[in-house]
Amino acid sequence: MTQEIIVSCLSLSFLDGTEPSHMHYENDENYFRGYEWWLMKEAKKRNPKIKLIGLPWAFPGWIGKGENWPYDYPDITAYYIVSWILGAKQYHDLDIDYIGIWNERAFSSKYIKVLRHSLDRLGLWNVGIIAADGDWSISNEMIVDPYLNEAIEVVGAHYPGTKTVKNALLTGKKLWSSEDYSTFNNDVGAGCWARILNQNYVNGNMTATIAWNLVASYYEELPFGRCALMTAQEPWSGHYKVESPIWITAHTTQFTRPGWSYLQVDGHLEGGGSFVALTDGLGNLTIIIETMSHNHSKCIRPPLPNFNVVPQRATFYLKGSFYMVQTLQVWHSRLDFESGKSSLFQQLHPLRVWRGRFSLDLDVDEVYTLTTLKTGWKCGYPEPPPPQPFPSIYSDDFNIRNPPFSEAPNFADQTGVFEYFVNASDAGDHVFTLRQVVVQRPITWVSDADQTISVIGNFKWVNMTVTCDIYIEKPRDGGVFIAGRVDNGGIYVRDSKGVFFWVFADGTYRVTSDLAGKEILMKGLAGVRDNAWHTLTLNIQGNSASGLLNGYPLWENVTISKPGNGWAALGTRSFEFAQFDNFHIEAC
């Protein structure tokens, strides 16, 4: 059974914020938004054979025509997805290998068939459909609907606990754990990853395992902080850390390739743990062994039943064409939870094989790779810069003519999308601005906020002064805010608290302690109007906050109790156009 080695891309909305779509509106197409195009091209530079997957987590609102549902108009949804695949090729020379349906949400058999037909009609026969990126229940329909079964190439489940179900096996399709891991990237996370990389096949016949997520490059206090294979969450300092799950990954990915096959063996070790064996069909053999103990290999989900692993001597017998193998290269990792000094991906002396037989003494919490390949390499890398907190004084005037990305650095959009904008109608100081561009509530994956918001800074900030020029574009009921001490984001953004300073197109202002705008601390008249630039300043010191409009005090001495710290932020009252410029923070 073939094994796939995957990098997963295409996401409009996810656990820790939002990403821009290639089609904000029905008549809009832009294949240069966001960082995913760059990420895919960089991945291909390093490994031209790496596989690329698209999986929508949400959809632009125009697809549902007012309903929070992507399947009422399956031709429109398929057009949106196929456009992204075609754009990847046309503008970036990227071939998308697989496409999903809707992350961890309901599937539509009709839509899957329409999508397959749309792909085939445009010559995209090589793009496989993965379904349904939730549980295994789609297999119940596949075994009674031959057209649905034919449309799907891979049955993918999320966090399957290394187990599959009978009907999934009966489909005859490749089975994948199409999202897994999602665990804090310390040594327990490495143990989780080592165990499921093997046991998803040993227990569940799954030939691919995809980690969410690859690199933790989002503020750590957002949901699922550092639940990635490595950490790079300080672009302002350049600091990064190659965590232990990276080297656990190397035990598999350095010694196999897409297209290799798993050998049909019982991969359970007598003393606990597991092994898998793979071949390229050309005489090469790779065996990966793991002996992760229960408490040192718990993933974030699902709950892990108790099991025991003990030190053991394992004897292996190579048969058939592999009987002639005389030597295996050995790579080893040991997770040391007592001293904290783990040994990761070290090359040991080659192992002699005698007449197809060899033995190995296995301790607990170890990973071995035994392989005929001599290409393994633990690469060195420059010592990264030391970690630094987010700058306590930070400014961005957004004056960049040809930005490398569509979004400003360090801002983390949580609802809505904030993009660089050339304000051609303004001949003054606001030609280059930051603009919120999503004007219709998306078809959401989770219960996103009704307001748009982008956070920035250091979550530990207590006292801060935030200043920003704002431009309300929506007449009558449009509005914008700046904020401090914002305490939440991602899937919990709807419940965000903080200090929010709002101004509205009807000339009023409001100070609230929540993003929803329901907990009002002060309100009144401000004289702000739409289609005009104004400057807002929010000052938070200890238990008191004050606000300025165009440099003059508007409100002061508002008592605040909690939250006691958090990010700075900006955003809009609803899904509406609005612009921001000359953003400045001074904080501590």
Image (cartoon, rainbow, N blue to C red):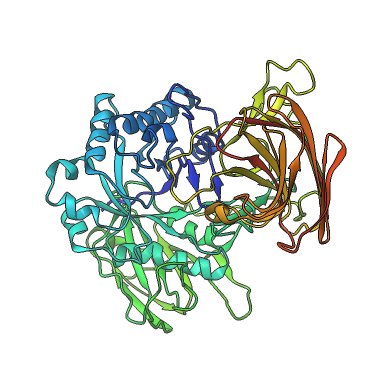
Residue occupying the point 74% across, 32% down: 528
Q: The C terminus lies in which quarter of the figure? A: bottom right
Residue at point 52%, 38% (across, down): 36
**Outermost residue toward the right in this view:** 552
The count of marks equals 0
Q: Is residue 161 visible?
A: yes
Is 408 placed left or right of 109 in the picture? right
Position of residue 418 measured from the top left corner of the image (x, y, whole percent): 61, 35
Along the line of sight, the residue nearer the viewer: 371 or 44: 44
Closer to us: 129 or 40 = 129
Q: Is residue 505 above or below residue 242?
A: above
The location of residue 88, given as percent across then percent down, is: 44, 29
Q: Does 22 sit left or right of 321 as displayed?
A: right
For residue 461, which quarter of the picture? Answer: bottom right
In the rendered image, which quarter is residue 317 located in? bottom left
**573 up-or-down from 189: above or below:** above
- Name the residue furthest front: 524
How far from the left and from the top, in percent, is residue 22?
48, 30
Q: Residue at x 62, y 33 (%)?
A: 478
Q: Depth check: 415 or 476 in front?
A: 476
Position of 464 relative to 331 (above/below):
above
Rendered residue at 48%/69% (across/down): 191
Residue 387 x/y as whole percent: 75, 56
Vertical side of 391 occupied by 128: above or below? above
Could one spot residue 392 in this view of the protein?
Answer: no
Q: Nearer the viewer, residue 16 or 3?
A: 16
